[in-house]
Amino acid sequence: MAGKDRLVVINRGGLILPLPLSYRDRLLQIPGVTGATYANWFGGVYQDEKNFFGQFAIDVPTYRGVFKEFDIPEDQWKAFEADREGAIVGADLAKRFKWKVGDRIPIKGTIHPGAWEFNIRGIYKGRREADDNTQFWFRADYLEERRTWGKGTVGWYTVVIDNPDSAPRVIKAIDERFANSAYETKTDTESAFAASWVKQMGNIGLLVTVVGSVVFFTLLLVVGNTMAMTVRERVRELAILKALGFADGFVLMMVLAESILVAVIGGSIGLGLAKLLTLGGDPTHGMLQFFYIKTQTLIIGVVLASVVGFAAGILPALSASRLRVVDALRRV
């Protein structure tokens, strides 16, 4: 979901600490920075605390220019600009709660207490499969007007750089610009920032790898045992094939092909169900907004299923190819 030419600037003490609104103009003065916007985390509750989704107070004049991957009809964006209580919501979020343009949405403030109400003026949709369509945007000036604390501060900045290759230099320049100040900064590429955000819930990559490895070897044992039983039950049939003149190599390839076919069919069904689970949007309801399965991942899954079928079937296939016709026909 990350832009290659975007950096995220947060308070060095952590994301929960703010940065001054005045930093935006100073960021734009740094060589290599071509644009900057900011946002605040709102953290309100819609109807029930279980209805989690990201709510962001955004800088309307600059936000759309930085996040160009989000498609919003022009008339809806203008309506949002004209309404102080206006809001823009992601397509998946609107589908989840059955919202539509014109609805008035009440949200109970937690970080900023009080009853807040917003008018949905537009629905956005990301152009890429990985784009987050579960966000709720409203105007930062509306938050600034109503909040009782934190005036003149923002949650984080997102800056655009002229060349992704210059990211290390710009990151260093930004952090040095605000070093030894009351609000020191920590700057990362957007991809690194997103990865660190997900890691707060634990090492998901390691967890998935461990579970996947266990499942992989379990399937290997199950398919191997299935093929071994199949060969034992067909000893007489295999012996008849060899007696009719079929070569050992043909018998080996036939058993091996069956093993691969069984594994690929089973793997394809599993991959299809996994893809079906993600077609309706985020199945984790806001916990992992970027949950999706790429076509490349599906292809890798089919290849791995083929590998399982080959590994599980090679020993039974070799055993079948080495059968002696006389010994096999004697079995009952």
Image: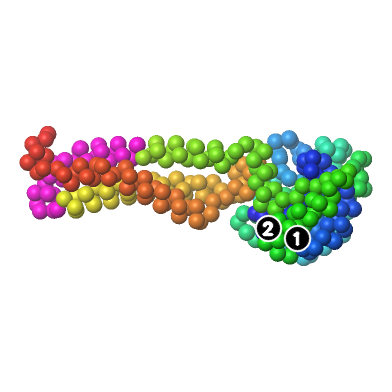
Mark drawn on residue 33: none
Q: Is residue 40 visible?
A: no
In percent of width and height, residue 231 lies at 22, 41
Which residue is denoted by mark 2 in the rendering?
3
Question: Residue at 75% of width from left, 54% of height from top?
Answer: 171
Q: Please, what is the three-letter code of the amino acid marked with disc 1?
A: Val
In percent of width and height, residue 185 lies at 80, 47
Question: Which of 6/301 is in front?
Answer: 6
Determine whether the residue tagged by mark 2 lies in a helix, strand or loop: loop
Magenta run includes residue 208: no
Question: Residue at 45% of width from left, 50% of height from top?
Answer: 301
Quarter the N terminus occupies: bottom right
Task: Note whether 286 is above or below 3 in the view shown.
Answer: above
In percent of width and height, residue 82 lies at 87, 59
Do the numbered discs 1 and 2 sit on residues whose CB atoms are within 8 Å? yes
Task: Note whether 28 is above or below 150 in the view shown.
Answer: below
Which residue is denoted by mark 1 in the rendering?
160
Q: Residues within 10 Å of mark 1 (few under 14, many from 20)?
A: many
In this picture, which residue range is highlighted in magenta? 221-247
Q: Please, what is the three-letter code of the amino acid marked with disc 2?
A: Gly
- Answer left or right for 280 relative to 47: left
Determine whether the residue tagged by mark 1 lies in a helix, strand or loop: strand
Identify the mark nearer the N-term, 1 or 2: 2
